[in-house]
Amino acid sequence: MAMQVFNSLTRRVEPLEPLAENTIRLYTCGPTVYNFAHIGNFRAYTFEDILRRVVQFNGMKIKQVMNLTDVDDKTIRGANAAGVALTDYTKTYKDAFFADLKVLNIQPAEVYPAATDHIPEMIALVEKLVEKGVAYKSDDGSVYFAVTKFPGYGKLAHIDFDHQRTGARCAADEYDKENVGDFALWKAWEESDGPVGWDSPWGRGRPGWHIECSAMSMKYLGETFDLHTGGIDNLFPHHENEIAQAEAATGKPFVNTWMHCAHLRVNGEKMSKSLGNFFTLRDLLDKGWKGREIRYVLVNAHYRQGLNFAFSALEDARRALERIDRCVDALAARANDEPAPAFAQEALDAFTAAVNDDLNTPKAFAALFDLVRQTNASGTCSKAVLDVFRKMDSVLGVIFFGKAEKAEVPAEVQALLDARAAARAAKNWAESDRLRDEIAAAGWLVKDSKDGQSVTRKSV
Ligand code: AMP
Ligand code: ZN
C-alpha cells in the first residue's frame, strides 16, 4: 500500500506522491530562537521526523526546509533586554536547538534558512504583492496584505470570510489596517526595535513572520511544492497567510498537502511558553530521562491525537525500551544465518501498513512489540529478524543496536580496527586518521573513548 496522509486542506486521507524527481519537497515551520525549545515544540519536530523517515522508508527522497525565525517581537525584545546584538542573542538558541535535535535522534533537514539571511527575498515578494494590488502601505510605513483581495482566503482553515467581513471592517476603522483580518507583510521601525531594522522601499523596518515562510519555502522548494507541516496552532492564521501571500504573488497553487500535529498538553492545556506550563528538553534530561525515552513518548501517540504529558509515560517508555533492548541484544548475541521465520515478515507487513496509513505509530509500535513477543517465544536466532528490527527503527528511531553492532562488524572492518588500535598504541596518529577514513568508507564510524575504540554503522 502506498503512503497515505491526512491533508488538512482537503480534510481527506490521500496518497502522498511526489510532484517531481521522486522527491517530496517539505517545508516545516521551525523554531523562534529566543529561548530553548520546549517538548511541545519537539512534538511537532518529532512528528515531522517520522514523516520524513516514512517517506524514505517508501523509497522516495526528501528535501526538507526548516526555517529559523531569528527576527520577530520576541527575539528583538530578548536581545535588547540583554543588551546584545540580535545575531549573538539568537545564536545561543540556534546552537541549543541543533544540539537538542541530536539528542532526540531527529534527522537533520536539508536546509535551515535563517530569516535574517533572506530579507531581500522577502522585500521582493512584498513588492510583488504591492504591484499586484493585494498589498498596501499604511501611513506609518508598514505594508499590509488585503485579505479581501485574495478570493481563496480561508480555504485551509475552512472559514468563509465573505460572511464575516462587514463587521470586521467597521471595527478596523481606528487602525492603520483597512480590515482587521489584514496582516503585516512589513513592519515599520519602532523605537523599541532599537538597532534592529533593514532599509526597504517603504522605509526602515523588518519583515512580518508570515512572509518569511512564503519567501524562504519558494526560494528552496519552488513556487509549487509537495508538503507543508506544523503544529495545529500554525494552521490559522500563519499557514492561511502563507498561502495567500504565495498564491497571490505567483498565481499558482502553493502546496499540495498540508499536515498538522495536535498539541502536547499539560493538565489539558497546550504546553506553551506563555502559559508557563512547559518543560524544555534540558529540564527532562536534568531529571535523568534519556533522549530516546522522551522521543518514545512523543512519537508513540498518533500525531493527530492530543497527547497529555505525564512522567508516568516516561516510566512506561523506559520499561518498553528495556524490553526491546533485551530482545535485540539476545538476538544479536546468537544471530545466525537461518531463514527468517514467517512472523518476522508478517510483523514487517503490519508495520508498513500502519506507517503508510497516515503515520499510525501506535499500530506500528504494536507490530514491533508483536515481533519482540514472537522472537522471545520462538527462540529464533535468525539475523533476518534483526534486519526487520532495523527496518522498523529506520522509522521509529528509538532502538539501541549497540550490542547487535558489535556482533555484526564484518571481518574486514575488524581487521582495519585492529590495525588502527596498533597505530594508536604506537602513537602514529596520521595512520590512525587514515584508517578511520578507510573504516568510514566501509560504512562504519569509529568513536574513541577511554575504553578504546568502538564502531557504529553509519546512518544513511
Ligand atoms: P514556535 O516556536 O512557537 O513558532 O513553534 C514551533 C513549532 O512548534 C510550530 O510548528 C508549533 O505549531 C509547534 N508547537 C508549539 N507548541 C506546541 C505544543 N504544545 N504541541 C505541539 N506542537 C507545538
Ligand atoms: Zn512558517
Image (cartoon, rainbow, N blue to C red):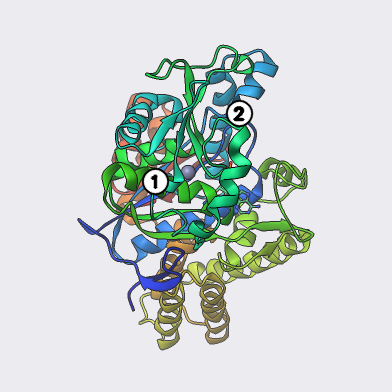
Instruction: Judge from the rendering whether residue 38 lies leftward or rightward of residue 303; answer left or right.
Output: right
Whether the residue carrying mark 2 lies under 8 Å from ligand 1 is answered with: no
- Mark 1 residue type: Lys
Whether the residue carrying mark 1 lies under 8 Å from ligand 2 is answered with: no
Residue 102: percent from the left, percent from the top? 52, 43
Identify which residue, 220 or 322, lies in the foreground: 220
Residue at 33% of width from left, 29% of height from top? 127
Instruction: Judge from the rendering whether residue 99 lies leftward or rightward of residue 52; answer left or right.
Output: right
Where is mark 1, residue-wise? Answer: 149
Instruction: Judge from the rendering whether residue 421 lies leftward or rightward of residue 16; answer left or right.
Output: right
Distance CA(mark 1)–CA(mark 2): 27 Å
Whether residue 110 is visible to the viewer of this picture, yes or no, is: no
Task: Tell me the quarter of the image containing the N terminus.
Answer: bottom left
Closest to the camera, between mark 1 and mark 2, is: 1
> Dot 1, how many residues are within 10 Å of its Cα: few (below 14), some (14-19), or many (20+)?
some
**Among numbered discs 1 and 2, the one appearing first in the sequence:** 2
Q: How many marks?
A: 2
Among the 4 quarters of the image, the one containing residue 395? bottom left
Residue at 52% of width from left, 29% of height from top? 70
Relative to 258, residue 109 above or below: above
Residue 295: percent from the left, percent from the top? 60, 56
- Mark 2 residue type: Asp
Identify which residue, 188 or 140, lies in the foreground: 140
Identify which residue, 119 or 181, lies in the foreground: 181
Whether residue 307 is visible to the viewer of this picture, yes or no, is: yes
Where is mark 2, residue-wise? Answer: 73
Residue 162: percent from the left, percent from the top? 48, 57
Helix, strand or loop at label 2? It is helix
- Of all residues, the one furthest to the left in this rendering is 21
Instruction: Judge from the rendering whether residue 429 lies leftward or rightward of residue 359; answer left or right.
Output: left
Residue 263: percent from the left, percent from the top? 63, 58
